[in-house]
Amino acid sequence: MTTTARIGFITVSDRASSGEYEDLGGPAMQAWMGKALTSPWEPVARLVPDEQPLVEAALRELCDEQRCCLVVTTGSTGPALRDIVPEATEAVCQKMMPGFGELMRLESLKFVPTAILSRQTAGIRGNTLIINLPGKPSAIDDCLNAVFPAVPYCIDLIDGPYLETDEACCKAFRPKHAKRPEGK
Amino acid sequence: MTTTARIGFITVSDRASSGEYEDLGGPAMQAWMGKALTSPWEPVARLVPDEQPLVEAALRELCDEQRCCLVVTTGSTGPALRDIVPEATEAVCQKMMPGFGELMRLESLKFVPTAILSRQTAGIRGNTLIINLPGKPSAIDDCLNAVFPAVPYCIDLIDGPYLETDEACCKAFRPKHAKRPEGK
Amino acid sequence: MTTTARIGFITVSDRASSGEYEDLGGPAMQAWMGKALTSPWEPVARLVPDEQPLVEAALRELCDEQRCCLVVTTGSTGPALRDIVPEATEAVCQKMMPGFGELMRLESLKFVPTAILSRQTAGIRGNTLIINLPGKPSAIDDCLNAVFPAVPYCIDLIDGPYLETDEACCKAFRPKHAKRPEGK
């Protein structure tokens, strides 16, 4: 039996949530996932303003009630007063995963020196991996390309569903002992 | 109207503050800024011993009373008992900016393997960006060369003055929408 | 007079501590140290399950009672529920040293994209440097090769014994003023 993985997508933006802007980040994250994942999955999407309590509530809901194995956020990771996603993420996680932020910044530095302004992080809440992504769709792709090869094995380790990827888009890595025969 | 940016410089050193040593780090930071910035600015300099409460007080004064948009510190970032600048910085900041420390260490690693001993960080207090720099003048230059291209846009994002740089010394980056016509 | 440096080795593993698995990480760390260090040292080894209070107790004992200048741990640094070594390390340290984890992940990324799943860190407790290493022996070697060149000077700075290394195995770096004449 194959489990359908639930994946949460949270767009954090005052202007997108008020309808002033179109939400581009949420669809960009879903489009990337649609190309990369070959195992069954379904999206759970939310759009919230840059308010830390609302972002924390959305993260908790997608982790605890919607049972997502992975939640990705877009936006609100910069230095401005209303950029609060890293703080919301840290507030709801039991474990922080500093390697994700480090690698995403390093990757983004290949394109812009302002990559160091991103405070993106990642962490674990129960059986869910939470990853902060930038707001800009092209930067979302760059960051997912960089970190996603480690995501399926991470989700194995927190007792989530077995995710499989299209190697042409994303070459996921698992140690030999963690691999399942194809199609199982 | 052009605002004169106020920039804070804090030298943290028991021996420099007691007069036993000449303060080399403070002047090195100011000299770098003099070469890099073409928009108007003025320095506010302080010299304090390696005492966390005194460093915190100096940071608060330069941020809240002197209204500096940027405060750079030199010294006291290593592993020794009296190295306390990262802790003082974290204590006064509302947001931490891990990308600065990561990039400064990565840059310094090109020169010495002991770069990983530096605990340098950066953060935001209100409308001020605080950046920890090493104690050694040549390492100060290396670190400012590495991170300063992101500083003017960071200060835009926290509602500070519009800093302009001499591209021959430091090529600051702003996304197109954030650029002002020259000379305005 | 030459001081014999005491070095602590903590293997953190439910299965190794219950006897189900052979402890491979502990001996791998000791073997690396045996090749790298030319100054006198003696090991103090402990084997504990993945329980945060027990790991904290072992760290405290090796730092405070056994007076180790360096304690290295192996295992329990991943994202799984029972991976608790980074939390235990942070709980007992006065200062965190983020550059160690950053460099170890960067080094491990050369081999596997899942390197970002390691939450390895390092920190200072009193006069002891604590470094988390991975569980796998080959990864232990990669990480020690990467960070150890900075370790002897770090231990100088926290008033520990003067460690010397075999340059063929590990080229330790000290600034000129910190070097002692050979054989002293």
Image (cartoon, coloured by chain):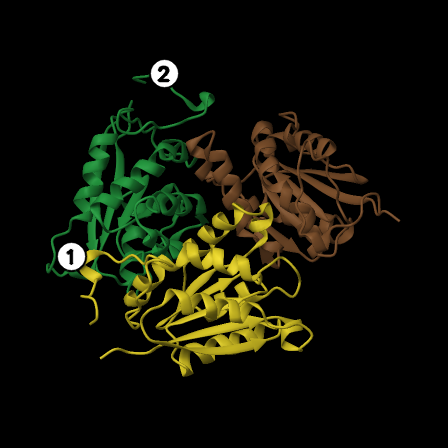
Chain colours: A brown, B green, C yellow
What label sits on residue B181 in the rendered view? 2
Q: Quadrant of residue A159?
A: bottom right
Say whether residue A54 is visible: no
Disc 1: which residue: B16
Image point (35%, 72%), residue name:
C127
Q: Chain of mark 1?
A: B
Residue type at mark 1? Ala
Residue type at mark 2? Pro
Same chain under badges 2 and 1? The reply is yes
Where residue B39 appears, as percent x and y from the top left, is 26, 26
Of circles 2 and 1, which is in front? 1
Q: Quadrant of the C terminus of chain C?
A: bottom left
Where residue C140 appears, as percent x and y from the top left, is 51, 60
Image point (42%, 32%), residue name:
A113
Image point (32%, 18%), residue name:
B184
| Label 1: element kind | helix
Where residue A64 appears, as percent x and y from the top left, is 74, 54
Q: Is residue A68 above or below residue C7?
A: above
Where residue A8 appears, as percent x and y from the top left, is 72, 42
Q: Quadrant of the N terminus of chain C?
A: bottom left
In the image shown, does C52 or B10 lie closer to the viewer? C52
| Label 2: element kind | loop
**Residues under numbered marks 2 and 1 in contact, where contact means CB atoms less than 8 Å apart:** no
Q: Chain of mark 2?
A: B
Q: Is residue C96 above or below residue A83?
A: below
What label sits on residue C64 in the rendered view? none
In the image shown, does B97 or A4 lie closer to the viewer? A4
Q: Quadrant of residue A167?
A: top right
